[in-house]
Amino acid sequence: MSIDVLIIGSGMGGATLAAALAPTGARIVILERGERLDDCTDARDPQAIFGEGVFRPDETWLDGAGQPFNPGNYYCVGGNSKFYGAVLLRYRAADFAPIAHLGGTTTGWPITYAALEPWYQAAEEMYQVRGMLGEDPTEPPHSGAYPHPPLPDESEIADLRARLIGVGLHPSSLPLGVDLPKWLARAATPWDAFPDTTGAKMDAESVGLAQALAFDNVTVETGVHVDKLQVDGAGRILGVHATGSTGQVEITARYVALAAGAVNTAALLLRSATEAYPTGLANRSDQVGRNFMNHNCSAALAIHPFRRNRATYQKTLQINDFYTSGGPGDAPLGNIQLLGRVSAPILAAQTRLPRPLARWIADHAIDFYVMSEDLPDPESRVTLKEDRIVLDWKCSNWATHEALVARLKRILRKAGFPVILSRPFDRRTPSHQCGTARMGRDPATSVVDSFGRSFDHPNLFITDASILPTSAAVNPALTIAANALRSAAHITETELAG
């Protein structure tokens, strides 16, 4: 079989790339180490998902101190997007330039927001985003409207929105990729961190992969673990060594696109070291695996002892009033959005509170997700230890996050919530991971160019979150998709045309 484009990973970057390249007629094969998720009772059971971790991988990584932990990555068709909160936010226009934070200054991007805007618009249309322009004071310019109106606030969230407006804020509707009637028809649960087994979320499988597989020239192979990339003496990637259900195989292709996620993409490049490339492939700059970023995140629960929260899904609202300013010295703080509804089983599993207390808190709380930017640091990195992944995340800019959490607590008290509890997310959990193969203009300081093409290997592209130069302070899924569409257009025009 002659393969034109071999894509490693079926998440947001890989599936979107495949969908965009499919109309060219090129022979495209997607390799996915996981399998398709089957619908089952566990898919809507919060105890199974959060308490028992039935969908978590049977895998351990090492942290910076050499201690093992079970990562928050998922291996399945559609990747982590199967579990995502379906938030499809654009980076703000200011995020593409260097920004001074309390913890340092970001690097900026090699392209402007304007260069990516058409691809943001295309990605919003592709992933059928529900949203509304004109509410968010930080909304960047849009060349078109959202394809669908925003999801409706439940009554408790409508009341919250009014309270936030009453204290001078500008709450806005979260841009979301969810078919709400279809999601609720399966069961009355939140979608945030619940697996999509019915196609009700607009995720990499239900949208990107479905569009790609509508073409006969695209196939997906599941249960295939890519062990190494192969490279010839001229620096071209020949293909991969992989392990599948029938054992080890070698697969060759004209072009290879990596979309395995920021940690696994970096690990695969490092694992593919040869005598000619002793520090790993695509690593002339020594930047592969470096600049790993998570978002700095906390959960905040706004509690009123005499008001019950009867919301089912909850996650329809965000606050960006402090995204570009509002901190000490008017520094940027970040994004605040609602979490999916935190039920008693979820709260008990995450905190080990007694179930009756967890139930009372959950019944009286509205749940917020507080997110601040983590800054790139070359010592925050992915490495290998005897072929085992080591993730040494050097959390940065934490004072910004603390300031944002404190600001939110003051606001919520003013808005009528007398008790606010907060807790940082586990810093070992790779949520919104990015940055380990960042794009740039200079091959000495970056891994790929602005189209995701490796500086070292002309037929190697990377289209996942690893190429993001900064994490910003919004969910990265839409930016990954927009970059993949832009890369696909470049590949089509420069490599596959004719």
Image (cartoon, rainbow, N blue to C red):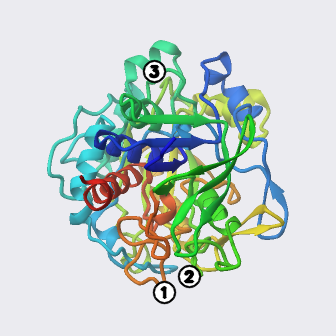
Decide: is 47 above or below 337.
above
User: Relative to residue 407, is residue 249 drawn left or right?
Assistant: right
Secondary structure, mark 2, is loop
Q: Where is residue 444 shown, x and y percent of the image?
A: 48, 86
Secondary structure, mark 1, is loop
Q: Say which mark, if any, is on residue 183.
A: 3
Q: Which residue is mark 2?
A: 284
Q: Say which mark, if any, is on residue 102.
A: none
* Amino acid bearing label 2: Arg
**Outermost residue to the left:** 143
Q: Which residue is mark 1?
A: 444
Q: Residue at point 51% right, 14% down?
A: 186
Q: Residue at point 33% right, 37% down?
A: 127
User: Relative to residue 233, is residue 121 drawn left or right?
Assistant: left
Of the pair 301 and 240, the residue shown nearer to us: 240
**Quarter of the image where one finds residue 343:** top right
Q: Residue at point 65% right, 37% down?
A: 34
Q: Where is residue 107 shown, x and y percent of the image?
A: 42, 79
**Foreground: disc 3 or disc 1:** 1
